[in-house]
Image: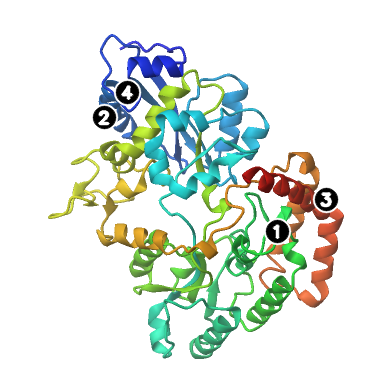
């Protein structure tokens, strides 16, 4: 079939033709080709074309769209998208991964606003994403579609249950553990296991340990632009977190952890991830997000490599803040000639369970089979596993994840666990600034400089490698010299304007 680049449909024409909501498309209608980035970890699945063909068997007849996947490494999405858009290359649906949202692209005029498109063609997206849609806003307009099944985040120290049991340490799943609580646990386990054992698996390039205790709203940006305290429920003053007593107390505690051997002496320089370190069996636990999917996946890994369960010692309550929904987002670049059809396709990945699972799992009988007696738990066919499967969507970025089949040994209880987690987020842990996103463009030089200073200190001061008595003031002085006060002042100004607009 020869594909034509269809002219953008007007809203009135769409309503007249009745094509909204996935009406069947006649053979005489143009088929619009949607070029979609397909994120990988560097290797393109060998059966991607087979899956693409299977998807097009449905999308061409249902919504008049032919999908063409454009494989791209998740580590190169920024460069790839920027180059494609600046050169005018055809790209209809781009993805932002681990970039803190859409700010970089929106500031450069690379994206289309999506508000009207979502209203007209994306109601299945809205139903699935709920409050997470707040993470897609920038400068008051919707530019990104978050890919979340989790309506919040919760943080924890994921801990080997066998060692808790060994030392008679009771685990309370309803408790929020403080620095002092963990210090007591670490002291008990470290004394019993000896000097070659460490309590905390950590890596200087991962999220800083203090981020698991601070409960701050970073206002759609980062620590470099200031934060709202107390889950975004506190005063409206945006503060420098590193000037707070809370941060100072943390640094003093983590210094004692380092000196007592709870952290390894090379914790700030090792290249092994926390999970890889845990798999050696020489660590008690690691800090991590602890939503049901994270705990389930880490438990599978721990059983496979260490032979034990992990349980979360929660260090925060489940909470909703804008930055939680900026990890992965879909965007429609200005190179898209038919944003209406593109949004229809994106919506179909939320609406159609078969499309969702073609994207995630591939083709039944070839890439997966249902576990006997289940219509939602799947396993690899005989002779295939995660290491040799010809199709894998290794990054969870597609559509309504609550329609995604779960891979054994997980089971049907996963869906209920996720629903229960989402309903556990109470009003007092939903930030008052939800939906606000700081635009650093007017202070971008200072913002970049402040981020550089934070990066310089987070893996040494933040992991107890250096003495806070001598280094704390050096850190704070360096932040001021880089311009953090200017950045926070600009953030405070924008936030006040945003608050006024909400009223």
Residue 154 pos. (x, y %):
49, 64
Disc 4, disc 1: CB below 8 Å? Answer: no
**Picture disc at residue 236:** 1
Q: Secondary structure at mark 4?
A: helix
**Picture disc at residue 54:** 2
Front position in the image: 376 or 438: 438
User: How busy is the neighbourhood of tag 1: few (under 14 within 10 Å), some, or many (20 plus)?
Assistant: some
Q: Secondary structure at mark 2?
A: helix
Q: Secondary structure at mark 3?
A: helix
Single out the mark in the foreground, 2 or 3. 3
The structure residue drawn at horizontal position 35% and vertical position 36%, both measured from the top left corner, is 349
Q: Earlier in the sequence, mark 4 or mark 1?
A: 4
**Picture disc at residue 486:** 3
Q: Earlier in the sequence, mark 4 or mark 3?
A: 4
Quarter of the rendering containing residue 334: top right
Quarter of the rendering containing residue 207: bottom right
Question: What residue would you read off at disc 4?
Answer: 63
Q: Disc 2 to disc 4, how far (Cα)?
A: 15 Å
Single out the mark in the foreground, 1 or 3. 1
Q: Disc 1 to disc 3, how far (Cα)?
A: 17 Å
Q: Earlier in the sequence, mark 2 or mark 4?
A: 2
Disc 1, disc 2: CB below 8 Å? Answer: no
Compared to residue 98, the image places residue 157 above or below, namely: below
């Amino acid at each position: 079939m020869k594909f034509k680049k269809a002219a953008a449909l007007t809203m009135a024409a769409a309503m007249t033709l009745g094509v909204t909501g996935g009406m069947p498309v006649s053979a005489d209608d143009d088929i619009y080709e949607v070029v979609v980035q397909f994120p990988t970890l560097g290797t393109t699945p060998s059966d991607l074309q087979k899956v693409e063909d299977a998807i097009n068997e449905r999308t061409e007849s249902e919504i008049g769209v032919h999908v063409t996947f454009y494989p791209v490494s998740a580590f190169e999405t920024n460069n790839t998208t920027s180059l494609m858009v600046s050169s005018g290359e055809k790209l209809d649906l781009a993805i932002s991964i681990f970039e803190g949202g859409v700010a970089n692209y929106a500031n450069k005029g690379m994206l289309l606003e999506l508000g009207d498109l979502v209203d007209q063609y994306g109601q299945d997206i809205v139903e699935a994403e709920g409050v997470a849609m707040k993470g897609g806003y920038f400068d008051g307009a919707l530019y990104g579609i978050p890919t979340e099944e989790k309506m919040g985040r919760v943080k924890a120290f994921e801990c080997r249950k066998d060692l808790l049991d060994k030392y008679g340490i009771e685990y309370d799943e309803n408790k929020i553990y403080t620095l002092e609580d963990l210090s007591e646990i670490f002291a008990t386990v470290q004394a019993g296991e000896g000097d070659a054992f460490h309590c905390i698996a950590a890596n200087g390039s991962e999220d800083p340990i203090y981020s698991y205790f601070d409960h701050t709203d970073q206002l759609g940006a980062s620590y470099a632009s200031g934060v709202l305290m107390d889950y975004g429920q506190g005063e409206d003053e945006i503060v420098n977190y590193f000037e707070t007593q809370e941060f100072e107390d943390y640094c003093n505690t983590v210094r004692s952890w380092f000196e007592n051997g709870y952290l390894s002496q090379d914790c700030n320089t090792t290249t092994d991830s926390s999970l890889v370190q845990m798999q050696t069996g020489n660590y008690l636990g690691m800090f991590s997000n602890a939503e049901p999917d994270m705990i389930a996946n880490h438990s599978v890994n721990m059983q496979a490599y260490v032979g034990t369960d992990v349980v979360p010692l929660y260090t925060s309550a489940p909470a909703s803040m804008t930055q939680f929904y900026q990890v992965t987002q879909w965007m429609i670049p200005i190179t898209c000639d038919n944003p209406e059809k593109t949004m229809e396709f994106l919506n179909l990945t939320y609406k159609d369970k078969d499309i969702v699972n073609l994207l995630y799992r591939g083709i039944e009988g070839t890439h997966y089979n249902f576990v006997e007696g289940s219509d939602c738990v799947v396993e690899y066919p005989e002779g295939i596993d995660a290491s040799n499967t010809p199709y894998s969507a290794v990054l969870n970025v597609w559509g309504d994840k609550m329609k995604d089949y779960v891979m054994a040994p997980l089971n049907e209880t996963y869906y209920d666990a996720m629903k229960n987690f989402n309903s556990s987020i109470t009003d007092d842990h939903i930030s008052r600034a939800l939906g606000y996103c700081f635009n650093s463009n007017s202070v971008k030089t200072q913002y970049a400089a402040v981020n550089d200073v934070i990066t310089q200190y987070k893996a040494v001061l933040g992991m107890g490698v250096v003495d806070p008595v001598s280094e704390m003031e050096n850190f704070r002085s360096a932040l001021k010299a880089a311009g953090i006060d200017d950045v926070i002042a600009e953030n405070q100004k924008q936030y006040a304007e945003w608050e006024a607009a909400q009223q």
